[in-house]
Image: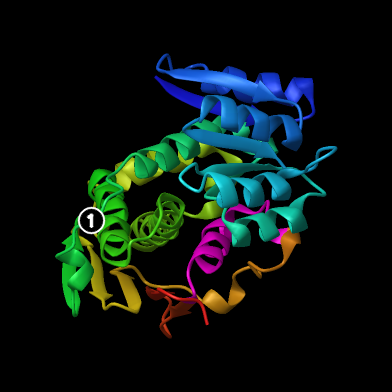
Amino acid sequence: MTTLLVVDDSPIDRRLAGGLLSKRADWTIIYAADGEEAMHKVRQFQPSLVLTDMQMPHRNGLDVVTDIRQTASHIPVILMTAMGSEELAVQALNRGAASYVPKRSMVSNLLETVSRVLASSHDEKSHTSLMNRLGERNETFVLENDLGLVMSLARYLPREMAQVWNFDNTDRVRAGTALEEALLNSLYHGNLEVSSKLKEEDNDAFHKLASERMSLSPYQERRIHVRFSLTPLIANFTIRDDGQGFDHSKLPDPTDPANLERPSGRGVLLMRAFMDEVKYNATGNEVTLTRRRFKT
């Protein structure tokens, strides 16, 4: 049984989040009203994941992320963000949170986000002595527009990096989240040309249009091209789609907390928070994510 801890000082928001998560019969939901109680529950129950509000009395969401990273780094933390908590949320992502969900879109996005983080967190944690002695490794992949393949690759690559570098589970989950966002952008916005604006307006319509285009020309012939390079000190992930590209200079500034609630900037924000460097090519259909083993 998977135990999830929901932390929020608002009884209404706790019930909303807990009710959505309770749709999964294999998940047990426990609750805390603030950061101080949350850490007590973490020590008592060792949950598989923590979902926390940002603004709370006693100890806020940033404190929760910091404490868990220091005392139970294998437990991923997802933030629930609301208007007014954006700056704290950006700090929490930089300190180790695995992902975030705006409160206004919890109904449509919470289960998917929690499921993705849990799936990544439950993958292999150990590394082998052979892989830890790797000199250099290069791999290439060419993927059809298949969501299952995209998600498998997003979990495979950070797992391989974590094995070589002996990263903890949270660092691996964060790298996987960044890769998921980059790969999903290539799939939906690049190859299938489905906009973030439609997702914001109608999530079901977004996925319906994407599904339809997977079997239509010219979309179905397009591929996602991935290059993975790993050394003992640096990892590069280059992801290119066959779409028409875009002007990445027009993306909302992902470092501006005011843009935290905007779907069009969510992926870039997570990529920049969890990777050391994010670079697009001139046409905007290729992005390179760089992760260094040691921070400089």
The one of 115 and 191 positioned closer to us in this rendering: 115
Q: Is residue 272 shown in magenta?
A: yes
Q: Which residues are magenta?
A: 259-277
Quarter of the image where one finds residue 243: bottom left
Give the position of the N terminus as an image quadrant.
top left
Label 1 secondary element:
loop
Say which residue label 1 marks: 217
The one of 15 and 146 positioned closer to us in this rendering: 15
Q: Position of residue 253 (x, y in %)?
A: 66, 70
The one of 268 and 30 positioned closer to us in this rendering: 30
Q: Would you say residue 204 is visible in this rendering?
A: no
In this rendering, position of residue 22 left or right of residue 146 = right
**Extreme residue toward the bottom, this view:** 282
Residue type of the residue flagged with mark 1:
Ser
Q: Position of residue 66 (x, y in %)?
A: 65, 52
Q: Is residue 127 shown in magenta?
A: no
Q: Is residue 254 above or below residue 69?
A: below
User: Callout 1: 10 Å neighbours few (<14), some, many (20+)?
Assistant: few
